[in-house]
Amino acid sequence: MHYEVFDNRIVYRDDERIYAEVTFPKVEGNIVDINHTFVDESLRGKGIAGMLMYMVAMDLKNSNRVAKLSCSFAVKWFDMHPEYKALVVD
């Protein structure tokens, strides 16, 4: 399995199926909305969602974008990782 990064989503997949994803569509300008995180039940508790959030944070940082957080997991993750607070807007 491997991660794939797109403009507005990151997925964890094999050749046949997506097992996890986070979506962050553009809202306006350089602002995106992290609005959905999903991890297949078979992989929950293995840190996949956290890795997806870390990858989103790095993507935002590298592309000079910031995020609104409408996904509850994203809210929790960014609360637990204050080092990325500058990437979040209200």
Image (cartoon, rainbow, N blue to C red):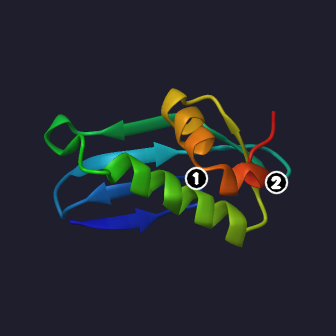
Would residue 79 appear left or right of 4 to someone viewing this image? right
Would residue 46 appear left or right of 73 to someone viewing this image? left
Q: Which of the image's four quarters has the C terminus? A: top right
Residue in front for this viewpoint, 13 or 60: 60
Of mark 2 and mark 1, the one earlier in the sequence is: 1
Relative to 3, residue 39 above or below: above
Q: Which residue is mark 1?
A: 8
Amino acid type, callout 2: Asn
Residue in front for this viewpoint, 35 or 25: 35
Relative to 52, residue 88 above or below: above
Amino acid type, callout 1: Asn
**Secondary structure of the residue carrying numbered label 1:** loop
What separation in Å lies between label 2 and label 1 (alpha carbons)? 12 Å
Mark on residue 30?
2
Q: Report if residue 76 is visible in the image.
A: yes
Q: Report if residue 35 is visible in the image.
A: no
Relative to 4, residue 51 above or below: above
Residue 42, quarter of the rendered image: top left
Q: Residue at x 20, y 52 (%)?
A: 17
Looking at the image, the residue that sits furthest to the right is 29
CA neighbours of label 2 inside 10 A, class few (<14), some (14 to 19), many (20+): few
Q: Residue at x 51, y 62 (%)?
A: 55
Residue 14, horizontal then vertical, whole percent? 19, 62
**Secondary structure of the residue carrying numbered label 2:** loop
Residue 19, horizontal then vertical, whole percent? 24, 48
Label pair 2/1, CB-CB below 8 angstroms: no
Q: Residue at x 38, y 55 (%)?
A: 11
Q: Residue at x 73, y 49 (%)?
A: 85
Looking at the image, the residue that sits furthest to the bottom is 62
Residue 75, horizontal then vertical, whole percent? 59, 34
